[in-house]
Image (cartoon, helix red, strand yellow):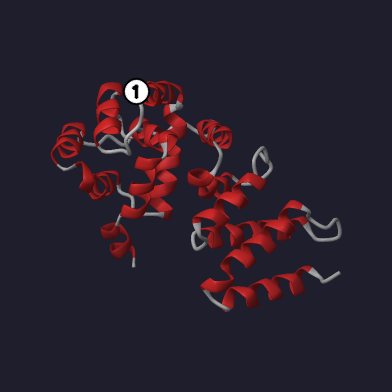
């Protein structure tokens, strides 16, 4: 069996081969983390966790979803890694991730201008994602994904202080078309999402998937 350093060197070689090998690389790192050899030092585990977290931002949606399902119910992994899986995780895993975030210390709200958001959803729903991204401080690709994901949309609403009625209107106007039953289910999701957990998840997204102007300023 290769030593930890040899294993890491092999994975770094895969990483150097570029985007074409990202899914393969992510799968190998996940295999290692989920079946950690007893003779490998525990301290190395964090190194490989950080590597997988970084790779996850470069892997396609289908591969991300397959990886996410393998980590469901694994509370022994760091929350930052699980947060990267949120948008491709099954609903039960999303609930687990929100609950983990909610266990963290209470943080303040991140209020946005709800009236501006609602007005934009009414006036130009097809181009709503860029405004949501700007106001919430996240990148446009992520904002578009949030609009398609019921739990993610409920989470960002809770995190930014959007009330139930405004959330419902935005979900109907700017998100993909849903049935009446699905829209009622969205309200139940909004009620169930823990506010502190949602704020921590948004803080994670703002750090790792910042709005363009924040990313450019940091660079």
User: Relative to the observer, which residue lies in front, 218 or 213?
Assistant: 213
Question: For numbered disc 1, what is the local secondary structure?
Answer: helix
User: Relative to the observer, which residue lies in front, 51 or 108?
Assistant: 51
- Total numbered labels placed on residues in the image: 1
Furthest-front residue in view? 179
Image coordinates of residue 153 in percent, x first then y, are: 37, 36
Image coordinates of residue 122 in percent, x first then y, are: 16, 35
In the figure, residue 169 lies in which quadrant? top left
In the figure, residue 55 lies in which quadrant? bottom right
Image coordinates of residue 24 in percent, x first then y, are: 63, 66
Residue at x 64%, y 56% (from the top left corner)? 49
Q: Is residue 81 left or right of residue 203?
A: right
Crowding around mark 1 (Cα neighbors within 10 Å: few <14, some 14 to 19, many 20+) is few
Q: Check the picture and name the quadrant holding the N terminus.
A: bottom right
Q: In this view, does 117 lie above or below 7?
A: above
Q: Is residue 154 above or below residue 146?
A: above
Image coordinates of residue 144 in percent, x first then y, are: 33, 48
Q: Check the picture and name the quadrant holding the C terminus.
A: bottom left
In the figure, residue 196 lies in which quadrant? top left
> Which residue matches tag 1?
180
Residue at x 16%, y 32% (from the top left corner)? 115
Residue at x 19%, y 33% (from the top left corner)? 118
């Amino acid at each position: 069996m290769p030593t930890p350093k040899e294993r890491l060197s092999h994975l770094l070689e895969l990483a150097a081969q570029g985007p074409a090998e990202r899914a393969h690389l992510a799968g190998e790192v996940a295999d290692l983390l989920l079946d950690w050899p007893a003779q490998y030092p525990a301290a190395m585990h964090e190194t490989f966790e950080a590597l997988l977290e970084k790779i996850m931002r470069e892997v396609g949606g289908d591969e991300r979803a397959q990886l996410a399902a393998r980590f469901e119910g694994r509370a022994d992994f760091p929350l930052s890694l699980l947060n990267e899986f949120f948008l491709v995780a099954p609903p039960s895993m999303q609930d687990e991730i929100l609950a983990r975030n909610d266990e963290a210390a209470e943080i303040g709200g991140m209020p946005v201008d709800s009236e501006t958001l609602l007005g934009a959803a009414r006036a130009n729903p097809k181009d709503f994602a860029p405004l949501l991204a700007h106001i919430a401080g996240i990148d446009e690709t992520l904002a578009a994904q949030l609009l398609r994901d019921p739990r993610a949309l409920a989470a960002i609403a809770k995190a930014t202080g959007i009330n139930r009625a405004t959330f419902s209107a935005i979900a109907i106007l700017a998100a993909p078309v849903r049935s009446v039953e699905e829209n009622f289910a969205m309200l139940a999701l909004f009620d169930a999402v823990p506010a502190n957990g949602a704020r921590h998840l948004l803080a994670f997204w703002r750090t790792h998937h910042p709005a363009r102007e924040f990313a450019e300023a940091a660079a």
